[in-house]
Image (cartoon, coloured by chain):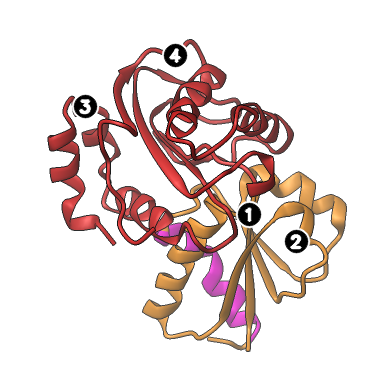
Chain colours: A red, B orange
């Protein structure tokens, strides 16, 4: 994957989720719809969080649901959802408002996905993204961050 | 060369992101190191001088009783926190 694009297919705004597990399922559902992961992936992410703690909460306000390639990844891909009601992960202080779920097939090929996630966090764009309601606004905001 | 391993649950996302922030901190302070990322289950068997991971993994690492320096971060991509915690370790190792 050379370029990262957010499209109608992999983005959803103001998604309703009852808790962190539900939010993971909703974000991963877009990966599944796009053929990036199989039906086991979301449950594997939830299992990993239960086992290892909230390692997918990268920075306050943002989670990056993902698990090992062998847990159901079919190809490299990502999805972005914003949550209508932020969800709290156990042992964390601040609720998560933005989720960028991704799938990886080895430890390197998804480099560009990680790059854009790091740029979003380092530039402090999470709050702005959480308030966005349109794809064009989203792509405009992160245009300069494209790897 | 100094080897730094960044560790998270799956070894793909948070650790990879943290590795980038660590790389950028090392560049700022002029230290060269060999960096990699991995999942926690393979971390214990990997040779490294320093392991960097999230606070939520601290208790799991303590069980392994590892010989290398361990650094635990509240925020994995917070360059300020990384620098604050990494610099003393690098100085103790004579790398800075």
Residue B87 is one of the magenta-drawn residues: yes
Mark 3 or 1, which is nearer the eye? 1
Q: Distance between the residues labelled 3 and 4?
A: 16 Å
Residue beneath disc 4:
A17
Q: Residue at x 70, y 76 (%)?
A: B49
Q: How far apart are marks 3 and 2 (CA)?
A: 38 Å
Residue beneath disc 1:
B11
In the rendered structure, the answer to whether residue B76 lies left or right of residue B54 reads: left
Residue beneath disc 3:
A131
Q: How far apart are marks 1 and 4 (CA)?
A: 27 Å
Nearest the eye: B36 or A73: A73
Residue B83 showing in the rendered view = no
Q: Mark 1 — on which chain does it sit? A: B
Mark 2 or 1, which is nearer the eye? 1
Q: Residue furthest front?
A: A35
Q: Residue at x 68, y 36 (%)?
A: A48
The crowd level at tag 3 (other Cα within 10 Å; few <14, some 14-19, many 20+) is some
Residue beneath disc 2:
B43
Q: Are marks 4 and 2 in contact (CB under 8 Å)?
A: no
Quarter of the picture containing the N terminus of chain B is: bottom right
Q: Do the residues labelled 3 and 2 touch (CB within 8 Å)?
A: no
- Badge 3 and badge 2 in a common chain: no
Sequence-earlier tag: 2 or 1: 1
Q: Judge whether B78 appears above or below A72 on screen.
A: below
| Residue range highlighted in magenta | B79-93
Residue A112 position, x and y percent, is 39, 59
- Badge 3 and badge 1 in a common chain: no
């Amino acid at each position: 994957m050379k370029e990262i694009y957010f499209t109608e297919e992999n983005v959803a705004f103001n998604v309703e989720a009852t808790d962190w597990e539900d939010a993971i399922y909703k974000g991963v559902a877009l990966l599944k719809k796009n053929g990036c992961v199989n039906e086991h992936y979301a449950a594997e992410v939830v299992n990993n969080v239960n086992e290892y703690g909230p390692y997918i909460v990268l920075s306050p306000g943002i989670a990056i649901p993902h698990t090992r390639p062998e847990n159901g990844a079919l190809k490299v891909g990502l999805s972005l959802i914003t949550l209508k009601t932020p969800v709290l992960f156990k042992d964390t202080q601040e609720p998560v408002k933005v989720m960028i779920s991704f799938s990886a097939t080895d430890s390197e090929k998804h480099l560009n996905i990680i790059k854009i996630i790091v740029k979003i966090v380092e530039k402090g764009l999470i709050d702005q993204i959480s308030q966005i309601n349109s794809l064009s606004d989203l792509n405009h905001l992160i245009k300069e961050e494209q790897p | 060369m100094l080897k730094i391993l960044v560790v998270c649950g799956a070894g793909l996302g948070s650790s990879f992101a943290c590795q980038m922030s660590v790389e950028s901190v090392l560049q700022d302070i002029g230290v060269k190191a060999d960096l990699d990322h991995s999942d926690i289950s393979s971390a214990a068997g990997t040779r490294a001088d320093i392991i960097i991971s999230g606070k939520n993994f601290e208790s799991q690492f303590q069980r392994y009783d590892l010989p290398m320096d361990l650094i635990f971060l509240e925020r994995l991509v917070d360059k300020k926190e990384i620098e604050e915690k990494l610099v003393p370790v690098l100085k103790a190792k004579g790398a800075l």
